[in-house]
Image (cartoon, rainbow, N blue to C red):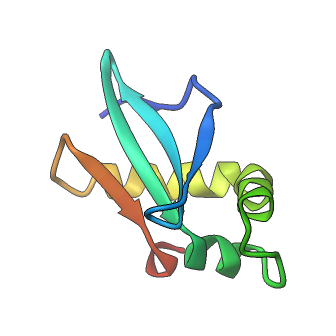
Amino acid sequence: MALNFPNPSRSYELRRNAVHFWGYDQSMETSFFISADALQQLTPGAGRDEVALLASFDRNAPLIRQAAMRLYGSGKKGGSYDLHPSHF
């Protein structure tokens, strides 16, 4: 497994109330979503609006990417992955 995150892009997904980001395993792109609840756990007291959640993601990006790598390495490949408070 060689998951990496060369693309710093992230976006807020209102429908999922989560921040969407991407990882790459060679040429295969994988979507990850981190829930607002997980971001709130990482940044207590932060707002729940788009700007606050994206700022929380940026502040905690290394930790979030480590959790994404653990989840990705846990078995299933392909599709998308959801990070929740239990992943931190």
Counting every numbered tag in the picture gives 0
Point out the residue furthest to the right here: 45
- Image quarter hosting the N terminus: top left
Tell which of 52 and 28 is nearer to you.
Answer: 52
Residue 54 horizontal/vertical position (percent): 72, 54
Tell which of 69 and 56 is nearer to you.
Answer: 56
Point out the residue furthest to the front here: 15
Residue 39 horizontal/vertical position (percent): 65, 70
Q: Which residue is drawn at the image coordinates 45% and 62% (left, top)? A: 15
* Quarter-of-image position of residue 27: top left
Tell which of 3 and 13 is nearer to you.
Answer: 13
Q: Which residue is drawn at the image coordinates 39% and 27% (left, top)? A: 24
As drawn, 10 above or below 83: above
- Image quarter hosting the C terminus: bottom right
* Quarter-of-image position of residue 7: top right
Residue 64 horizontal/vertical position (percent): 59, 56
Q: Which residue is drawn at the image coordinates 46% and 74% (left, top)? A: 84
Point out the residue furthest to the left here: 76
Residue 2 horizontal/vertical position (percent): 37, 29
* Left or right of 52 in this view: 29: left
* Quarter-of-image position of residue 44: bottom right
Q: Which residue is drawn at the image coordinates 80% and 63% (left, top)? A: 52
